[in-house]
């Protein structure tokens, strides 16, 4: 079925085209005034003032999980460095002093310039020592050396910024089922 | 502003301020997009993250009219001379942003064909990490670049440039003078040689003069 549409003939004001031009300008002016007066109704995000909401599952900057005594939970097995496709994790191991674990980590650097944020290191970690839930997504520096994040920066996170109901993020012995070790630490498994 | 600019007189320091204010609020980018980071840059240009808000009004697809070279994506060794040439075609002052892991460091392409960071080819002002970086990171980089532009001293750079030019002119004029002296000596020698040979010819033709 073909639908015939009759075109409305222009009246003489429209045929002058001068007023039509100003009608088009009025639309532009309306948007300009809206940007001046009602800024928050615009679709544009005013970035530096309003930060985007990033969920906890977004793969952002890494953090190293800690035991209650403040040492990193990492046991220096090197699985994250093996799994990393970009080879951006550099770690050095040393024998642990306390005798409860075999090795402790001496140096744990992540080069965030080479890192592609795939999350394979988090998947590979057997003791849940590495997470990517800091919601810190902006990495801007003027030198390449500044992107290398050392261990103390990865460890310096505030527990208040993370969900309190997540027991794993607050409790120490990540993933282990060794009851003796848990007793030695004085902890209970929920 | 740099301390040198602040120590300068009122005219030069305020001129520095004016020039830098104009420069930092009209950084027109040239998108050198070769991979997925360029898609993220397109999203930065859209209405949601409007890049025009900070004065980067137009994306210029010609190096002659742009201030910021935005390298977004993997740069291979085949691509490298093109990038270098485009950087050289840009008019000064020019700045470079390396966007994403590939452009900054090669990323996980640890292979025979990928340049491990474009700073092996051209100087880079601001690096953005991430694979790909979010538009917010790109905005952070632009703010950082604006700070860098603000810190530069136009008059100081101009004085350095003039000094270089004057030294160049002096060196060239010295070379020319030496060259002229050399040529003059050569010409004199040539003329005297010719005259001597002609005289000898004449003496050969008229041997009676020789006998005297």
Image (spheres, coloured by chain):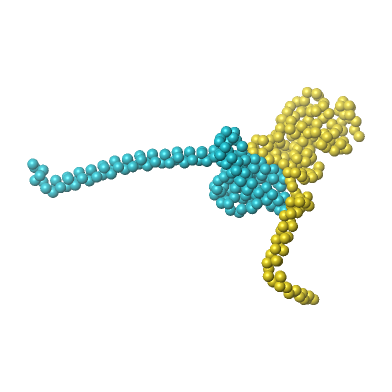
Q: Position of residue A177 (x, y in %)?
A: 87, 33
Horizontal arrangement in the rendering, residue B7 relative to residue B133 (left or right): left
Task: Mark yes or no: residue B189 visible.
Answer: yes
- For the residue pair B15 and B152, the one nearer the viewer reads as B15
Quadrant housing the N terminus of chain B: top right
Please name the residue shown 17% across and 47% down the image. B201
Please name the residue shown 51% across and 39% down the image. B159
Task: Mark yes or no: residue B127 visible.
Answer: no
Circle count? 0
Q: Quadrant of residue B191?
A: top left
Q: Colour of chain A?
A: yellow
Above or below B62: residue B152: above
**Which of the chains is cyan?**
B
Horizontal arrangement in the rendering, residue B112 relative to residue B139 (left or right): left
Q: Position of residue B211 (x, y in %)?
A: 8, 42
Q: Position of residue B129 (x, y in %)?
A: 69, 42
- For the residue pair B9 and A58, the one nearer the viewer reads as B9
Q: Quadrant of residue A175?
A: top right
């Amino acid at each position: 079925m073909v639908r015939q549409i009759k075109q409305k003939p222009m009246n003489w004001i429209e045929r002058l085209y001068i007023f039509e031009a100003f009608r088009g300008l009025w639309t532009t002016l309306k948007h300009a005034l809206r940007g001046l007066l009602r800024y928050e109704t615009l679709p544009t995000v005013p970035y530096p003032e309003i930060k985007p909401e990033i969920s906890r599952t977004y793969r952002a900057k890494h953090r190293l999980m800690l035991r209650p005594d403040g040492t990193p939970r990492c046991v220096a097995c090197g699985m994250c460095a093996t799994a990393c496709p970009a080879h951006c994790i550099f770690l050095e191991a040393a024998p642990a002093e306390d005798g409860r674990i075999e090795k402790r980590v001496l140096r744990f650097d992540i080069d965030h310039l080479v890192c592609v944020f795939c999350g394979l290191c988090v998947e590979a970690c057997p003791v849940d020592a590495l997470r990517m839930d800091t919601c810190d997504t902006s990495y801007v520096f003027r030198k390449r050396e500044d992107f290398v994040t050392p261990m103390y920066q990865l460890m310096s996170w505030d527990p208040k910024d993370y969900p309190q109901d997540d027991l794993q993020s607050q409790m120490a012995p990540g993933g282990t089922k060794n009851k003796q070790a848990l007793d030695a630490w004085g902890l209970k498994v929920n | 502003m740099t301390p040198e600019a602040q120590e300068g007189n009122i005219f030069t320091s305020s001129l520095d301020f004016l020039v830098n204010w104009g420069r930092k609020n009209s950084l027109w980018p040239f998108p050198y997009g070769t991979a997925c980071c360029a898609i993220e840059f397109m999203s930065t240009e859209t209405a949601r993250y409007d890049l025009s808000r900070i004065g980067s009004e137009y994306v210029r697809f010609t190096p002659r009219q742009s201030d910021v070279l935005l390298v977004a994506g993997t740069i291979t060794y085949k691509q490298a001379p093109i990038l270098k040439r485009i950087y050289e075609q840009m008019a000064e002052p020019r700045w470079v942003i390396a966007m994403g892991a590939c452009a900054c460091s090669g990323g996980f392409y640890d292979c025979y064909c990928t340049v491990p960071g474009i700073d092996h080819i051209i100087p880079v002002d601001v690096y953005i990490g991430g694979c790909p970086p979010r538009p917010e990171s790109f905005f952070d980089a632009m703010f950082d670049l604006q700070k860098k532009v603000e810190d530069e001293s136009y008059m100081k750079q101009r004085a350095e440039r003039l000094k270089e030019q004057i030294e160049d002119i002096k060196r060239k004029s010295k070379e020319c003078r030496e060259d002229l002296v050399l040529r003059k000596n050569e010409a004199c020698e040539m003329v005297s040689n010719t005259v001597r040979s002609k005289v000898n010819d004449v003496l050969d033709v008229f041997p009676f003069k020789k006998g005297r």
